[in-house]
Image (cartoon, rainbow, N blue to C red):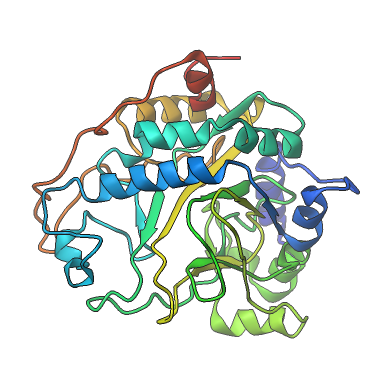
């Protein structure tokens, strides 16, 4: 069980906890019971195609020999800096116009408004994922099961989302989840881990041995299938990771990560950090109201030198409407 110190820390971090209390008769029931859900047709297929093309145009805008029709050019040297999990969060991409347009899609925002019971929301400054399948220069990323919520937090604090812009079928890249793991994650932490190892970091990796504990409870990895335009949602307490495409896939996975939470959950300090990140065109974390950790802005080459393709901001800035500034945490509701 948690020590008194851990208990005190738990108490201090849970002012914004929440609980889904269905039955709702819609996808929120699955989010509650399974830890994830797919909201069908959150944007139209035509919009999904538009956003994917904008993402691919961005990817090929760095004056390299990268040609999306020539797989031999799909190499690290021809790509902007990409994390080991296929995400892009530098070069101002989090604040490109098309990224903000996608974040402001009415049905996307409405899905989160239904979860939290308010449309006065903040949005994360999250990443773009473009996964080129069957790259000869890169081994497939091994699974890295994790949750994006500290053991010190109890209850529902964050729901993550993927605006799906490409087909996610059985062989394609997509989100992998352990269904229902959100329902027992706190029991796992309290009975299978040492509270002295807990911290406020809202990322907790789950080891191979620890995964067995979940699998013994019939929680097996499941790839989330989705169509272009669908919105994938998951509770940050759900064990998950990014699934790589198989050798049989020819789909360029293209997704935009989004997360929204009530604006009144944010502290003044969190809003200050959001403003600083917004002004600097920096990406942050999967969280919208807390855990606002700016990603390093500059992109560096493997030898440690500054990437000559480094950008101080987006190629195309968004239109700074009142609604955008409210979602960004710049303008109060």
Work out whether 50 lies above or below 233. above
Residue at 28 percent of width and 29 percent of height: 316
Asked where in the image residue 137 lies, by quadrant, the reply is bottom left
Front residue (pair 205, 181):
181
Looking at the rendering, in which quadrant would you find the C terminus? top right
Front residue (pair 13, 138):
138
Looking at the rendering, in which quadrant would you find the N terminus? bottom right
Residue 243 horizontal/vertical position (percent)? 50, 71
Residue 323 horizontal/vertical position (percent)? 53, 18
Residue at 55 percent of width and 51 percent of height: 200
Residue 298 horizontal/vertical position (percent)? 21, 44
Residue at 53 percent of width and 23 percent of height: 268
Residue at 76 percent of width and 62 percent of height: 34
Outermost residue, right side: 23
Residue 26 horizontal/vertical position (percent)? 82, 48
Q: Name the side, left or right, on which 242 lies relative to 300.
A: right
Q: Name the side, left or right, on which 296 lies relative to 125.
A: left
Front residue (pair 296, 170):
170
Q: Name the side, left or right, on which 28 lies relative to 104.
A: right
Exactly how many numbered labels are in the figure?
A: 0
Work out whether 268 lies above or below 49. above
């Amino acid at each position: 069980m948690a020590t008194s110190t851990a208990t005190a820390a738990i108490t201090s971090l849970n002012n914004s906890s929440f609980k889904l209390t269905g039955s709702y008769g819609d996808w929120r029931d699955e989010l509650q019971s399974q830890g994830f859900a797919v909201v069908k047709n959150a944007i139209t297929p035509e919009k999904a195609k538009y956003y994917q093309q904008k993402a691919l145009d961005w990817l090929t805008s760095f004056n390299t020999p990268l040609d999306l029709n020539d797989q031999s050019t799909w190499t690290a040297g021809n790509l902007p800096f990409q994390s080991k999990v296929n995400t892009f969060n530098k070069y101002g991409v989090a604040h490109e116009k098309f990224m903000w347009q996608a974040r402001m899609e009415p049905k996307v925002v409405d899905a989160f408004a239904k979860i939290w019971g308010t449309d006065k929301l903040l949005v994360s400054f999250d990443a773009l994922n473009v996964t080129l399948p069957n790259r000869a220069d890169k081994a497939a990323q091994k699974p890295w099961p994790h949750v994006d919520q500290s053991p010190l937090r109890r209850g529902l604090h964050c729901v993550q989302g993927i605006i799906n812009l490409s087909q996610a079928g059985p062989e394609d890249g997509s989100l992998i989840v352990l269904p229902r793991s959100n329902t027992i994650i706190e029991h796992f932490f309290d009975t299978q881990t040492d509270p002295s190892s807990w911290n406020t970091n809202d990322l907790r990796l789950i080891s191979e041995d620890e995964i067995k504990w979940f699998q013994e409870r019939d929680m097996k990895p499941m790839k989330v299938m989705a169509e272009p335009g669908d919105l994938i949602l998951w509770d940050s307490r759900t064990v998950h990771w990014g699934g790589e495409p198989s050798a049989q896939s020819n789909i360029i996975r293209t997704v935009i990560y989004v997360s929204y939470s009530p604006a009144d959950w944010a502290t003044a300090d969190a809003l200050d950090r959001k403003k600083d990140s917004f002004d600097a065109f920096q990406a942050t974390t999967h969280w919208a109201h807390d855990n606002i950790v700016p990603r390093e802005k500059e992109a560096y080459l493997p030898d440690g030198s500054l990437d000559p393709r480094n950008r101080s901001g987006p190629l195309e800035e968004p239109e700074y409407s009142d609604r955008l500034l409210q979602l960004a945490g710049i303008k109060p509701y």
